[in-house]
Image (spheres, rainbow, N blue to C red):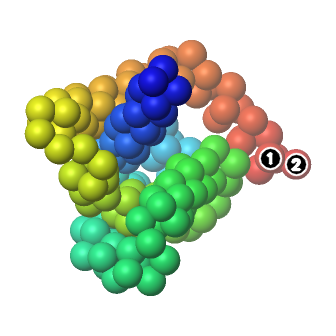
């Protein structure tokens, strides 16, 4: 009895954790002034588009996700989406080329779009009745929490570590 309750709790947490990153793509907006300073040759509008690119890509891949699910299944689709979102989100940490950062934002949006619709449909697959209703409410809360957390962490990193990061990138250009 306890094992099955533990498994149900882990399943709930796993499904809800998917929603943590659904709205986090816009968290970089706080870094735009620094990115503009780092890449003075890039038009400001192009730098600002880094915030919106994932949304457009996400829209396209939300539409394509049903075909991907039919081809590889829900679990693999979520894993593919999370992997792409992770890769697209991490690349800019190491990239010194604006084009690479730009492309990584497309990858982030594609990954998020692939698993976006599954964040809700998995709840319908595994739960019903009152539990399903609670889970749908929790899913909205987790999505909001993820967005807030990402923005909060970006703000902290900008105030605490951005100068070190910029210094590191600048030193790469000088060498």
Q: Does 71 appear above or below 144?
A: below
Residue depicted at 46% across the width and 31% down the height: 4
Q: Secondary structure at mark 2?
A: loop
Q: Does 74 appear above or below 159?
A: below
> Is residue 125 in view from this perspective?
yes
Q: Does 24 appear above or below 42?
A: above
Left or right of residue 25, residue 161 in this image: right
Residue depicted at 57% across the width and 16% down the height: 160
How many other residues sit within 10 Å of disc 1, few (<14), some (14-19) or many (≥20)?
Answer: few
Q: Quadrant of residue 162?
A: top right
Residue where numbered disc 1 is placed: 172
Left or right of residue 154, residue 98 in this image: right
Residue where numbered disc 2 is placed: 175
Q: Nearer the viewer, residue 171 or 103?
A: 103
In the image, residue 99 lies at what x, y percent? 56, 67
Residue depicted at 60% across the width and 64% down the height: 100
In the image, residue 134 lies at what x, y percent? 16, 30
């Amino acid at each position: 009895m306890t094992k099955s309750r533990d498994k149900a709790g882990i399943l709930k947490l796993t499904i809800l954790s998917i929603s943590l990153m659904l709205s986090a793509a816009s968290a970089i907006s706080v870094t735009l002034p620094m990115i503009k300073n780092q890449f003075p040759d890039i038009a400001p509008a192009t730098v600002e588009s880094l915030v919106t690119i994932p949304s457009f890509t996400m829209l396209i891949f939300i539409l394509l996700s049903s075909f991907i699910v039919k081809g590889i299944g829900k679990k693999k689709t979520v894993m593919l989406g999370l992997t792409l979102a992770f890769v697209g989100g991490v690349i800019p940490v190491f990239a010194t080329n604006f084009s690479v950062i730009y492309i990584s934002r497309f990858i982030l949006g594609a990954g998020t779009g692939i698993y976006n619709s599954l964040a809700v449909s998995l709840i319908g697959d595994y739960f019903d009745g009152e539990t399903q209703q609670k889970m749908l409410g929790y899913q909205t809360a987790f999505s909001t929490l993820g967005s807030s957390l990402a923005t909060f962490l970006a703000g902290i990193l900008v105030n605490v570590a951005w100068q070190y990061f910029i210094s590191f990138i600048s030193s790469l250009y000088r060498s």
